[in-house]
Amino acid sequence: MSSEFDTVDRLHELVSVAAQRCRDHSARQYGAESETLAERVVDLGEELHLDADHLGRELACQSERLAAAVSRSAARPALVPAGAVGVLPAAATAPARHLAR
């Protein structure tokens, strides 16, 4: 998110310079409007920063929950023994005698 903050900072600087130039060249209305816009850009930057902090905390919390779930599932004994993978029970491979009649 660093590039987004840099972009917001550059936009604020650009709008602030535009506001100052408008005031310097007797375009006070445009200067005031530009200054208001510059303030709104600052507010947007603060919201982005708060959102980034919130997102970072949320991602960290989800990572911790995922790690805890993985460690719990790794601690459980396997339902199927490792050597039995792909081996059918004897009853499934025995001939069906009741069908032979």
Image: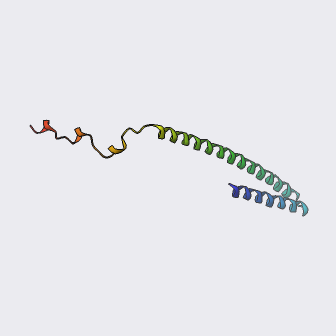
27 and 100: which one is in front? 100
Residue furthest to the left: 101
How far across and how far down the image is residue 55, in percent? 65, 46
Residue 42: percent from the left, percent from the top?
A: 78, 51
Question: Residue 9: which quarter of the image?
Answer: bottom right
Residue closer to the observer: 54 or 68: 68
Q: How is the image coloured?
A: rainbow
Residue 78 horizontal side relative to residue 29, left or right:
left
Which residue is found at the position 51% from the left and 42% from the top?
Answer: 70
Residue 78 position in % (x across, y down): 40, 39
For the N terminus, give its image quadrant.
Answer: bottom right
Q: Quadrant of the C terminus?
A: top left
Residue that lies at the very extreme toward the top in this rendered image? 98
Residue at x 62% of width, y 44% of height: 60
Locate residue 50 relative to residue 95 in the image: left or right.
right
Picture layout, residue 34 above or below residue 54: below
Q: Residue at x 67, y 44 (%)?
A: 54
- The x, y position of residue 89, in whole percent, is 26, 40
Total numbered labels: 0
Q: Residue at x 45, y 37 (%)?
A: 76
